[in-house]
Amino acid sequence: MKLLKSPNPTTKFLAFHFGGWLMFALVNAISRGLLTDENFEQLAAHTFTLISTCGFSTLVIREIIYRFNLLDKNWRQQWPIFILSSITLAFICAYSSLTLIFSYYNLAGYTAPSSFWNNVLGNWLLMTILMLSWTLIYITTVNQDRLLKVEQEAVQLNLQLNEAKMAALMGQLNPHFLFNGLNNIRALILEDTTKSRTMLTNLSDLLRYTLMAHKQKTVPLRDELEIVCQYIELLKIQYEDRLTFNLEVDSDLMGERIPPLLIQLLTENAVRHGIEKSRTGGELSVKIDSVEQHIVITVTNPGTLDITQDKTANIEDKKSGNTGLGLANIQKRLTLQYGEKTSFLIKQQGQQVIAQCHIPTSPLQLAV
């Protein structure tokens, strides 16, 4: 059974604790040396006595703090106990130190200071102030450490929560991705076996990329675009001439990193809500350039944006019953990953629907 309630003092704590009393004792010794004719041996005795008695007395205060759970109480409950313990321990400390000093003086043959009790009472007030000062410094330091620990735990918990949310959002994307690819290949098998094999290879690459991307926060832009092109090839099985794909990208951005499956999901959404609903189809355009240290990804498709509320803020198609899960996921993923450094909007412009997102370039890609 542990007798002490206070935590075992660390080496760092003991070093600062007794080091602080050593500094105070040295200042006191220098002052005594300037004001009295005491020699080095006498000053050393005063220094050792002050460090030992004050050092161990304040460790007793530390034990009192933890034994009565004073750190978890308000100041009205704390300070009466602090004051009472400081006054009591200050008297014990003054009495003990003077007893040691007088004993040393007698044994060494030095003339003892004046009245023993006058010295005890004279040092009592000083010791009380020292005890209260130490207590204030200690509880302030401990409270700051506890607050810092809570903040660190909160940050860690927030990161874990964001990762869990991101994984959940990614998990919602994969079923769409797999279903569309298999459905398109199924339609091709009876028509062109050779081409279906090629498309099955593409789908295999897509699935491999999806599994790997699920474990990464960002992927190189070139890898994402390669997968998007394979995905478009799969879609062309179904849409044939109804789907025209145009890609414009700044070659300097190929090494930049973006969230995985971001462009693929934008492309999928553009096909499902644009090309698929048009009898004649149309052109799906993906343009990627940079503006003010941000990668700007713009996906354009023919169609009509049927959103009952603000088109740049609410991504929900109430008329068709589609909750816009994919686009809502994009918005959540970007917010989780980049905070205020990113933006996403979808808008109607003439006979076209434009989805656009801004992602900070590599030097700015820091978690919030």
Image (spheres, rainbow, N blue to C red):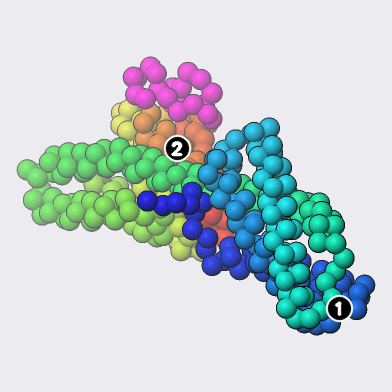
Amino acid type shown at disc 2: Lys
The x, y position of residue 344, in whole percent, is 51, 38
Q: Dot 1: few (<14), some (14–19), or many (≥20) neighbours within 10 Å?
A: some
Q: Dot 2: few (<14), some (14–19), or many (≥20) neighbours within 10 Å?
A: some
Disc 1 element:
loop
The residue range painted magenta reads 304-323
In the picture, measured across the screen, residue 44 lies left or right of residue 139, that is right
Hey, which quadrant is residue 98 in on the image?
A: bottom right
Is residue 314 covered in magenta?
yes
- Which of the two residues, 159 or 367, is positioned nearer the viewer here? 159
Residue at horizontal 6 percent and vertical 43 percent from the top: 190
The x, y position of residue 157, in whole percent, is 45, 44
Q: Is residue 300 visible?
A: no
Check the image and report above or below for 322 versus 342: above
Check the image and report above or below for 81 versus 220: above
In the picture, measured across the screen, residue 109 lies left or right of residue 346, that is right
Q: Is residue 310 visible?
A: yes
- Which of the two residues, 132 or 84, is positioned nearer the viewer here? 84
Q: Residue furthest right?
A: 35
- Which of the two residues, 119 or 186, is positioned nearer the viewer here? 119
Callout in the foreground (2, 1): 1
Of label 2 and label 1, which has the lower sequence position?
A: 1
Is residue 170 covered in magenta?
no
The label on residue 332 is 2
Q: Which residue is mark 1?
A: 38
Residue at horizontal 67 percent and vertical 63 percent from the top: 53
Amino acid type shown at disc 1: Glu
Tell me whether the residue at label 2 lies in contact with that at label 1, contact meaning CB atoms closer than 8 angstroms. no
Residue at horizontal 28 percent and vertical 51 percent from the top: 210
The x, y position of residue 265, in whole percent, is 36, 42
- The majority secondary structure of the magenta stretch comes to loop
